[in-house]
Image (cartoon, grey):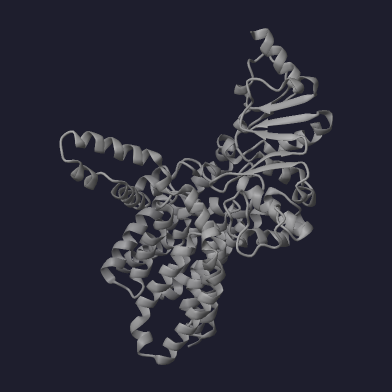
Amino acid sequence: MQKKVFNSRFLQYCIYGCLAVIFFIGCFTRFYRLGQIPTGISDDEADKGYDAYALLKTGKDQWGERTPLISFKGFGDNRSPFYTYSILPFLPVFDLTGQTVRIPSALAGSLTILVVYGIGVLLFKKRSVGLLAAFFLSINPWHIGMSRMAMESTIGVFFFSLGFLLYLLKEKERIFLFLTALSFALTFYIYPGYVIGTPVFIFLLFLSDRKRMVGNKKELFQSFLVLGLFLLVVAPMVVHLGGSSAGVRVSQVNITNDSGVIDLVNEKRGICSSSFPSVLCRAVFNKYSAFMWVFFTNIFNHFSPTLLLKDGTATQYSILPLRGLLLSIEWLLFLVGAFVLLKKKTPYSPVLLLYLFVAAIPDSVTGGGHYGRFFISMPFWQLIAAYGVSEVAARAKKVSWVFVPVLLLGLVEFLFFEVEYLTFFPYRYSQYAHFGYKELMEKVQTEKSSYDEIYISSRINDTKQYIFYLFYTKYDPQVFQSGNGVEKTVEQNGWIRVGKIDTIHFIPSFPNSFDTADSGKKVLLIGAPSEFPGPDIRTQFEIKNMHGDVFAKGVTLADWLLYTDNAL
């Protein structure tokens, strides 16, 4: 008896030891050099950070709205509020920096590893599945990259996964069912994709447990009570859905705004009408069928080897180098796990597999695969892959023949990725992370008193330079909120453009000729090298990327006009 107790305790210590090592790997890969890799911050990160900074200093966001609860106006995309508030506790300690803005995401990404372990154990009744799922998540390139950026979806995945874990714990304590409702409800306020994903997931859970719930009136009553609590918490977001990020953002970037699809439909109709009746041509070629075809094509693109295994997405270079979103061992084991789930039909098989399909729907409305919007599919890839390993091992004569190679292959592939991520990635992809904007905006602040006007062209690398200026100079939020010296426009689709702060102008590009009155002023032009008329023009300063290539130059208007006149 003592030997059995000893063996049981030893095994338990080994499990917790392995989990501790996995958690350490996850924390290290998410926090190490957090402020330096990626090498700069995105405009969205700067926007969240400055809003949090404004809240800390004034109790209002950058636009003067007092403690927004439903959404932050942002650039006019009406961002979900949770992430901005999550930055607040860290600002007094770490100040307004790129690292500070990313801490909530890195913390949520690390904690998700522990949550996934619990889901794997409770869902499949095997500690090995929990450990493997946590291991795969800790070394997953996609999750690492997202955890190192100030992304709402990373925190959304944490609370969504936590809600699933709490639901699985409901048999032990009923209080977990109420906590499930709160955790799922929070996802509405964290990331727009969950406005679709979370209700569908709850519905799938109900379908999986409906027989047991119907046979237990007390549990059924509690479930409806919890559902009522969930609806009560999400009601404010649902009421304001049209003006929230979920509504505004989709209206700005959805596939129906693609004029190219309409043009192609009209072209096909024109050619068709020369051979067949126009009624038939309109029935075959119309915008409804065209957009539905694009939509379903987008959904299936989310599960292609090109996206998951080979190249990833065309927009991912701010978080990852050119590579698939999953490790190849993850992808292969996911296929095994999905096959076994379909064959064995465990109680939650439909939940796991159908949710992955549902997770692709919000992103498919806007495109064929976006690293951020499709991130709500986490952590089901890892759970299914871990289950695949477990089932293969159960059929093997010696379990070690399966687990050891899988762990070694995963570690080797992860090691190759991590070395590239820490060395080549920040060097090669620095331009996608807006590297150099910190130096540029600090230079602008230094030169501000020496010039009457400063013009910054968006052809440098972004159309929202104003937010980098506010962020890196820690511009007084109260002054910006007052609107004094600030010129902004709200476009028809809702986007906000800031054209001027004090004497600094943010313009699309340099005009061919400035107003003659400007020639008598001391004016500094800052733009991309291609905007200046030749290599011999005298420059005041240059900003280089990590390659050593110049991506921004500062030239006085006098020198620019002089060189232009001489060139003519």
What is the residue that sits farthest to the right in this orientation?
449
Where on the picture, by quarter, is residue 446?
top right
Q: Nearer the viewer, residue 464 or 39?
A: 464
Q: Quadrant of residue 71?
A: bottom right
**Residue at x 61%, y 57% (from the top left corner):** 106
Q: Pick whichever, 30 or 401, lies toward us.
A: 30
Depth check, front residue: 541 or 382: 541
Q: Determine the residue positioned at 15% across, 35% down.
A: 275
Indicate the position of residue 493 as horizontal and vertical percent values: 53, 47
Residue 427 percent coordinates (x, y): 59, 36
Position of residue 405 measured from the top left corner of the image (x, y, whole percent): 40, 56
Coordinates of residue 26 in the picture (x, y in percent): 56, 58
Name the residue: 62% across, 23% down: 531
Q: Does residue 41 lie above or below 203 as drawn? A: above
Tell me if residue 206 can be seen. yes
Quadrant into which the C terminus falls: top right
Q: Is residue 91 above or below residue 473?
A: below
Q: Nearer the viewer, residue 422 or 12?
A: 422
Asked if one can make out residue 400 in the rendered structure from this viewpoint, the answer is no
For residue 52, above or below residue 463: below
Q: How many marks?
A: 0
The residue sitting at the front extreme is 278
